[in-house]
């Protein structure tokens, strides 16, 4: 079974972060924003063709690109 990533989660759905495949500066940036395994995430808006993906993470809103969202592995809650 393929791993579900944040860019594939529909608006309104909640999920839990299970892993992060980003490395280097991007991986550090995402961790600085609060992306850690176990973090609860709700997708607010997900533009289907162009960026961005808006999510609610730990009570605040974060906007990231689809390319970045593809590095965040999640499971639906």
Image (cartoon, rainbow, N blue to C red):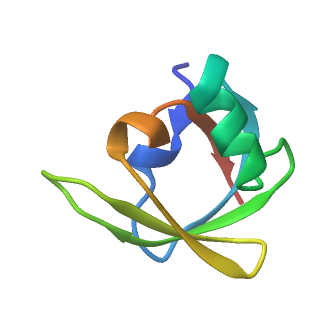
Q: Residue at x 67, y 79 (%)?
A: 60
**Depth check, front residue: 33 or 38:** 33
Looking at the image, is 63 positioned above or below residue 28? below
* Residue 34 percent coordinates (x, y): 77, 55
Furthest toward the front, the residue is 25
Quadrant of the rendered structure where residue 14 is? Answer: bottom right
Furthest toward the bottom, the residue is 59
Q: Total marks drawn?
A: 0
Residue 23 at least partly seen: no
* Residue 48 percent coordinates (x, y): 18, 56
Looking at the image, is 58 positioned above or below residue 77? below
Quadrant where the C terminus is found in the figure: bottom right
Describe residue 16's horizontal placement relative to residue 21 as left or right.
right
**Depth check, front residue: 27 or 72:** 27
Q: Residue at x 46, y 38 (%)?
A: 68
Describe residue 27's horizontal placement relative to residue 58 as left or right.
left
Residue 29 at least partly seen: yes
Describe residue 69's horizontal placement relative to residue 51 as left or right.
right
Furthest toward the right, the residue is 38
Quadrant of the rendered structure where residue 21 is? Answer: top right
* Residue 26 percent coordinates (x, y): 57, 30
Quadrant where the N terminus is found in the figure: top right
Q: Residue at x 78, y 72 (%)?
A: 58
Looking at the image, is 28 positioned above or below residue 62? above
Furthest toward the left, the residue is 49
Quadrant of the rendered structure where residue 3 is? Answer: top right
Describe residue 15's horizontal placement relative to residue 38 as left or right.
left
* Residue 16 percent coordinates (x, y): 74, 53
Q: Residue at x 51, y 21 (%)?
A: 2
């Amino acid at each position: 079974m393929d791993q579900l990533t944040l860019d594939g989660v529909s608006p309104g759905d909640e999920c839990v972060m299970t892993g992060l495949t980003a490395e280097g500066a991007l991986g550090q940036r995402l961790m600085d924003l609060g992306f850690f395994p176990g973090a609860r995430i709700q997708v607010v808006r997900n533009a289907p063709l162009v960026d961005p993906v808006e999510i609610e993470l730990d009570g605040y809103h974060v906007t990231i690109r689809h390319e970045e969202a593809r590095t965040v592995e999640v499971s639906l809650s």
